[in-house]
Image: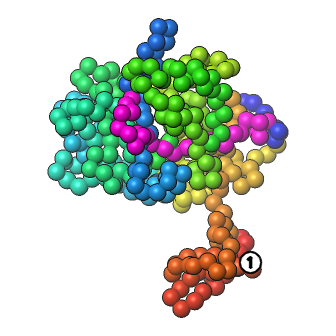
Amino acid sequence: MKKVNVAKLFVAISASFLLSNCEKEAVDDVVATDQLAASKSIPHVCIAKWDMHNGAKAASIKVKQWEPGQTIRVKFLNGNNFVQSKVRQFAVEWENYANLKFEWVSSGSSANIKIAFREGQYANETGSWSYLGTDSNSFAHSMHFGWFDNNTTDEEFRRTTIHEFGHALGLIHEHQNPVAGINWDTEAVYAYYAGPPNNWTRAQVDNNLFRRYEANISNYSQYDPLSIMHYPIPAEHTLDRVAVGRNTRLSDTDKSFIGTIYPFSGTGGDICAGVDEYVSGRSYAVGDKVTYQGTLYQRTASGWNNLGPCPSNDPCAGIAAYVSGRSYAVGDKVTYQGSLYERTASGWTNLGPCGG
């Protein structure tokens, strides 16, 4: 076991690991395909896909999560028994760490997630993608696997299936999280993705690789280069020649973070319940959890992993102050002079003082 002081705790903690989905630009010529170069190979990559008719992208993170404990209905629109069984086999790995369940229903049933493979009417869909979180409800075809067939390896089934279902649970690409801080060699990346088979514009590269999401609308934890949600990055694509490998399994951070978004009922929704405060000078083992200044951390082999903020006892936490002249709807809550108020049909109801 290794002793860690408070200073090291903060050095080891960076905030970040977001939620997004595989995006396709408004134009439909963006696809995810094999990336081959003479000296390296980037595997099939996923393009984030957003509901472009349901608000701005920046508002698509927290609000698109499912309810903890929810059963999500999933169906296949096509595909043979073999590829369907492989998707089911690896998708359910998320159930071990998130308080959610997948119910696999027949193709004629109603479902939240609707999966197609590259055949029949979807034969021209070469990429793999998923809509983000609850956006899946709005589309008859909400997830796609464009390179699965009977010859696909288990490693590729695992990598792509878990990745796409991560998007369906609300996770964005890890290289785009708010504090990723990747030192991109932008011109090298533009040049690489401009070539076949991608033929991406600079704007498409900006959107799928360089753009990072806003921290204030995102749930995130420590940046995790081992995340299943991370693109592989060759050393040639960064100025400091730091590469990110081809991640094929859920990382420790993936597992712990999804549990903070969808906590199991045993915690009562409080991820900090029963966890002791950090004690300077105490030895902690890998896997130990502590709370520190209102946040939950878990010890890893290399430092501390930020698992997210502890729930606040303050009923006013996250509630904006009353603004004179603004229009409020019934049910809206505001804070005013140290108290919490809720708008009713006849006026404002005082719900009690802030603090806790």
194 or 116, which lies in front?
Answer: 194
Find the residue positioned furthest to the top.
Answer: 38
Which image quadrant is residue 32 in? top left
Q: Is residue 1 magenta?
A: no
Q: Residue 244's x, y, as percent?
A: 57, 23
Left or right of residue 353: residue 41: left
Please report the bounds of the magenta region as a residue range.
8-32
Find the residue positioned furthest to the bottom.
Answer: 346
Q: Is residue 81 visible?
A: no
Main secondary structure of the magenta stretch: loop
Quarter occupied by the N terminus: top right
Q: Is residue 117 visible?
A: yes
Above or below for 194 versus 348? above
275 or 338, which lies in front?
Answer: 338
Q: Which residue is mark 1?
A: 338
Q: Residue 353's x, y, as percent?
A: 70, 79
Above or below for 188 versus 182? above
Counting every numbered tag in the picture gives: 1
Three-letter code for the amino acid on which mark 1 is drawn? Gly
Residue for point 37% across, 25% down:
33
Left or right of residue 68: residue 129: left
Residues packed near mark 1 inside 10 Å, few (<14), some (14 to 19) or many (20 plus): few
Residue for point 69% across, 39% down:
14
Residue for point 70% across, 79% down:
336
